[in-house]
Image (cartoon, grey):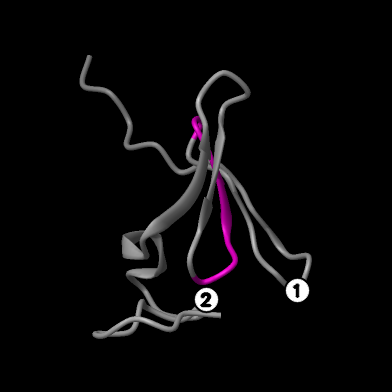
Amino acid sequence: MCTHEPACPTTDARDREAARTVASHPEQGWSLLCNGIVVFEDTGELLPDGRVIAPHRPATAV
């Protein structure tokens, strides 16, 4: 999906969230990345193959 240089991280890369945003819908709480991943404001992800990554916000200090 990515056609620019340098190429965005793949969907299996550890830094996959570093891909460029190609569509942003903050009013709905999600963005589409260049590598096909939909990221949600709660840090959850939907991968192009249908896998779901649960929200992974860092724990807050108490």
As displayed, is residue 35 above or below residue 44?
below
User: x%, y% of residue 38?
Assistant: 60, 52
> Where does residue 14 sit, x and y in percent of width and height?
36, 73
Residue 50 painted magenta: no
Q: Residue at x 78, y 65 (%)?
A: 50
Q: Is residue 39 magenta?
A: yes
- What segment carries the magenta color? 35-42
Badge number at residue 60: none
Amino acid marked by disc 1: Asp
Residue at image x 58%, y 61%?
37
Left or right, 35 with respect to 16, comes to right
Q: Is residue 1 above or below residue 34?
A: below
Q: Secondary structure at mark 2?
A: loop
Q: Is residue 58 above or below residue 46?
A: above
Q: CA distance from mark 2 to mark 1?
A: 9 Å
Amino acid at circle 2: Thr
Q: Which residue is mark 2?
A: 11
Q: Is residue 51 above or below residue 42?
A: below
Q: Is residue 51 left or right of residue 6?
A: right
Q: CB under 8 Å between callouts 2 and 1? A: yes
Residue at left offset 22%, top offset 14%: 62
Mark 2 crowd level (few <14, some 14–19, many ≥20, 10 Å Cα): some
**Tag 1's secondary structure?**
loop
Q: Position of residue 13 (x, y in %)?
A: 41, 79
Q: Quadrant of the N terminus?
A: bottom right
The image shows a total of numbered marks equal to: 2
Residue closer to the observer: 39 or 5: 5
Residue beneath the point at 37% across and 65% down: 19
Label 1 environment density (alpha carbons within 10 Å; few <14, some 14–19, many ≥20): few
Depth check: 26 or 44 in front? 26
Residue annotated with mark 1: 49
For marks 2 and 1 on the same chain, the one whose residue lies earlier in the sequence? 2
